[in-house]
Image (spheres, rainbow, N blue to C red):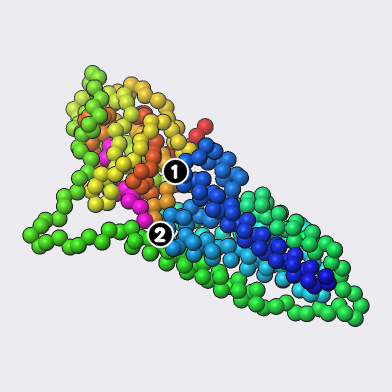
Amino acid sequence: MGRHEKTTIGTAWIVGGAGIGWLFSGALSGLTLAHQVRLPTQFTRMLFPETISMRTWQSAQPWPILLSLFSVLAVMAFTLLLLRRTGMPAGRQPLGFLATWMAIVLAGFATATLSSLGYIVASWPPARLAWLLDDIQPALLAAGYWGIVWGWLPALAGTLVMKSAKPLTGPKAVRRPADAMPLLIAGLLAVILVVTIPAAYTYTVEARTPQAAPPPPATPSPTPYGWPDRSDAFQPAKDNWCPGEDVSISWHEPEGATGHRGMGFDLTNTGTGPCVVESYPDIAFNNAEGWAIEVLVVHGGSFMTDDPGVSTITLPPGKSARAYLGWNAMAAAGDVRTGTMLVAPYSGTLRHSSQVDLDIIDGGAVSVTAWEPVLEPAGSNKSTRPKP
């Protein structure tokens, strides 16, 4: 077998192995995260990086199959392009193991970048411009980590096949220009990957939207059923607790870090005498149409909030206490998300409501801290506190 044949077989091992490894890691990651398994999520993502986004597997059929195929073909095309542009054409010495390995890592980075661009186009315009690039960094980190953990296998297999290939010398060594076909294929797959992700998102939203027949003219529109003005989970009030009728609630602007959110809200005593807050806030959420949604509320702190615990706070008229809401960023595209937030000083008393635009979805989870005294004037834009 000649040097050219061994180089071709080695290239096929590298390109094919990169595509199979990319699909294998993404499929196992999606399978283990979508189904309850005994392995912790952190361990699963370390062993099988999320090369194919979880949102791909949540799309309506046949898009999970098509998007996975396009993603795998893109990795293979970029790997072949990098190999051909850096030494694989006949007449050159094949790349070494480390250089081949790096080509696979860069191919994964390029594919993850294009997929992230497609999801940005699909969810445009974003709810908040500051959250536009939140999902890009995890995708790039997963692609780079996959290249380090799994990319060496096809690189090693290909270089071993080509190891015995001897470089051509003398008059037979011809330096031919690089073939433009890998570049054209990689460019075409890049366009397909960016264009098909928004198409899959639109198809999924339309497929999951119930196509109800228009109601008869005499039938009134259904009345939204939201959470009641008072929680059914009654909490016995202690002496001189601030009731919902004698307070006002004001909301701060939410703040975001990479994958994390936080927001503060103030309770101000509007009564004629002092009252006491000594509990966690009572919180519920409705969607934009006014329907109640289920959000798990946990007492405690989060990445962006710090819970001081319950304490007795006496509020003279006009003074305020503050609590904080913390949550992890949720993929809200195509899901029912919050439109109204309801807050009461404690469970069983009157709730106050305000329209909000937060990436908290039906079935999500948030954490809330206990009330604490406001050290700065009420209405400050500060909504979260740095953790010590």
Q: Is residue 201 left or right of residue 85?
A: left
The reply to whether callout 1 and callout 2 are in contact (CB within 8 Å) is no
Query: Can you give x and y, in whole percent of width and height, for residue 102 in the image?
Result: 71, 58
Mark 1, residue position? 328
Residue 318 makes an appearance in the image: no
Q: Which residue is at the far right?
A: 170
Query: Can you give x and y, in whole percent of width and height, for residue 160 in the image?
Result: 79, 59
Mark 2, residue position? 60
* Residue 339 covered by magenta stretch: yes
The residue closer to the viewer here, 237 or 181, is 181
Query: Can you give x and y, in whole percent of width and height, for residue 247 in the image?
Result: 23, 33
Residue 205 makes an appearance in the image: yes
Please tell me whether the stretch drawn in magenta is mainly helix, strand or loop: strand
State the residue at coordinates (54%, 49%).
Answer: 29
Q: Amino acid at mark 2?
A: Ala
Tag 1 secondary structure: strand
Q: Where 90 falls versus 116 (above or below)? A: below
Question: Which label is found at residue 231?
Answer: none
CA gap, disc 1 and disc 2: 25 Å
State the residue at coordinates (55%, 50%).
Answer: 28
**Displayed quadrant of residue 212:** bottom left
Which segment is the magenta one?
334-343
Q: Where 35 falls versus 344 (above or below)? A: below
Tag 2 secondary structure: loop
